[in-house]
Image (cartoon, rainbow, N blue to C red):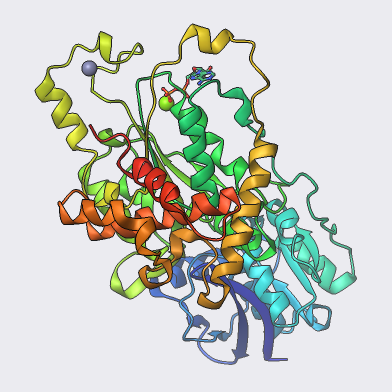
Amino acid sequence: MSYAKVHAAGISGVTGVLVEVEADVAMGMPQLVVSGLPDAALHEARDRVRAAVVNAGEEWPQRRMTVNLRPATVRKQGSSFDLGIAVAILGGAGRLPLAALDGVALIGELGLDGMIRPVRGVLPMVMAAARAGLTRAIVPEANAAEAALVPGVRVKAAASLNAVMNYVRDGVELPAALPAGTPDARPRLDLADVVGQEHAKVALEVAAAGGHHLSLLGPPGAGKTMLAARLPGLLPPLDDTAALEVTSLYSIAGRLAPGAGLIRQPPFQAPHHTTSTAALLGGGTGLARPGAISLAHRGVLFLDELPEFSRSALEALRQPLEEGSVRIGRSKDLVSYPSRVQLVTAANPCPCAKPGGDSYCECSPTVRRRYLGRLSGPLMDRIDLRVELFPVTSAGLFAVDEPLETTETVGKRVVEARNAAAERWRAYGWRLNAEASRSALRLAPAATADLRHRIDTGLLSARGYIRVLRVAWTLADLAGRDRPVREDVATALTLRLGDIR
Ligand SMILES: Nc1ncnc2c1ncn2[C@@H]1O[C@H](COP(=O)(O)OP(=O)(O)O)[C@@H](O)[C@H]1O
Ligand SMILES: [Mg+2]
Ligand SMILES: [Zn+2]
């Protein structure tokens, strides 16, 4: 036999692509020509495959070998094709019967020693195999549980090229992988842990119900981080499509714990203010790693200590926030990852950050003004809800009041409000009030009289006007009204202008 064909898989953007690996083995000058891979990846793959084959105890065929990866138009990043290339070569050289690999996707990087090493993105790759009608996959051991999450594909785990050859030649079974059972290891944080800060909790509920961005301003220890971390718990669990999308992003980032199941809880990412722009947006050589903004996709991106972030980092976040996707890399290798996040920012009112709040502040008025000034700008302009928190008092902390509302109770109201909004906007294709556009938001003049006055006196921008209306609709949804009344608009306005002193 001089020709062989196997299935492999790679990644394009956030989706997997099934790839055909063909090998033609002919008489002639011994050499290996690989086409259909980018140059850099090609050289490395060729060296790895050769060393792995030899170290697996096989003779390297002294033939003219041509390997082609199809479709050629798909940009193939990463090292997941090694296993397919090695097996196709051995098949083409007549060393391996390939009948057992009909309908099997081969995924894995080869070590020089012939071991199969884990790769990033196995989940979307196996999903691609399933879409193409394949029912079996052989993947690296460390990725097996993740691969087994895909319905309809039987997954086997292979530790080495030898193990695959023994399976193909002699039917030595490879271990079957089972989908992991533990869905989300994250502890569930409850809203009832937060004492006081009632208006901030209301804002958090409104944010969850309408998909609005939220900013929290207040002294250290007031509970800003606590509140932000409790937003994902108020959001409904991810549906099947979203769960696969989010889990795929974590798979591509290499951030799925071995044995972890599908991600069902909306993610929470809190990058430190010193995080590089590349780590916020994503990047890196080979298969680009999704950044914090994509790891927060369909969840919450928390920017704690917002004024400490560099201007350039905040500027870089603006477009992905607006567009819901982030483009990474230079023009030739551009990839795009989704980045539909709900933003929560937190800030201290001044750089000295005294826990007791303003009465202990040592900053001059100029310093305070300059610090707060960093809270303006294009990013802040997109934030619908702005809340100021005050220091928690001991009276508040130790009060034996009626029990505080739990995440479960508030979460139920959030789901009802979201359902009402999704129902209303169905014809427009929106799910959240935060997505609604101006014409659809229009209200009777009586409800918006105060707003119009503010615009006419220059106190509210046109953009601000739309954002206030969106929040007013969310308040109405939470209250079970079919449209906002004047009071909803007034509350929305307070929430929008809230903390800017
Ligand atoms: N409102 C609150 N209710 C209960 N505990 C609080 C509250 N605010 C702060 N704490 C306590 O103080 C710690 C620090 O709160 P944190 O949320 O990090 O404050 P901030 O982010 O505003 O600086 C929390 O871990 C918690 O133990
Ligand atoms: Mg904090
Ligand atoms: Zn200060």
Residue at image point 61% right, 52% down: 480
* 462 with respect to 387 (left or right): left
The x and y percentages for residue 313 are: 27, 47
The x and y percentages for residue 73 are: 46, 86
In-front residue for pair 445/159: 445
In-front residue for pair 191/250: 191
* 429 with respect to 361 (left or right): right
Residue 2 occupies quadrant: bottom right
Residue at image point 66% right, 58% down: 116
Is residue 120 visible to the viewer in this orientation of the structure? Answer: no
The image quadrant where one finds ligand 2 is top left
In-front residue for pair 182/371: 371
The x and y percentages for residue 185 are: 69, 38
In-front residue for pair 109/315: 315
Q: In this view, does 129 lie above or below 441?
A: below
Give the position of the N terminus as an image quadrant: bottom right
Q: Which residue lies furthest to the left in this view?
A: 366
* 425 with respect to 448 (left or right): right
Q: In this view, does 275 lie above or below 25?
A: above
Is residue 203 visible to the viewer in this orientation of the structure? Answer: yes
Residue at image point 22% right, 53% down: 453
- Total number of numbered discs in the rendering: 0
Q: Is residue 392 above or below residue 411?
A: above
The x and y percentages for residue 486 are: 41, 51
Give the position of the C terminus as an image quadrant: top left
Residue at image point 72% right, 51% down: 261
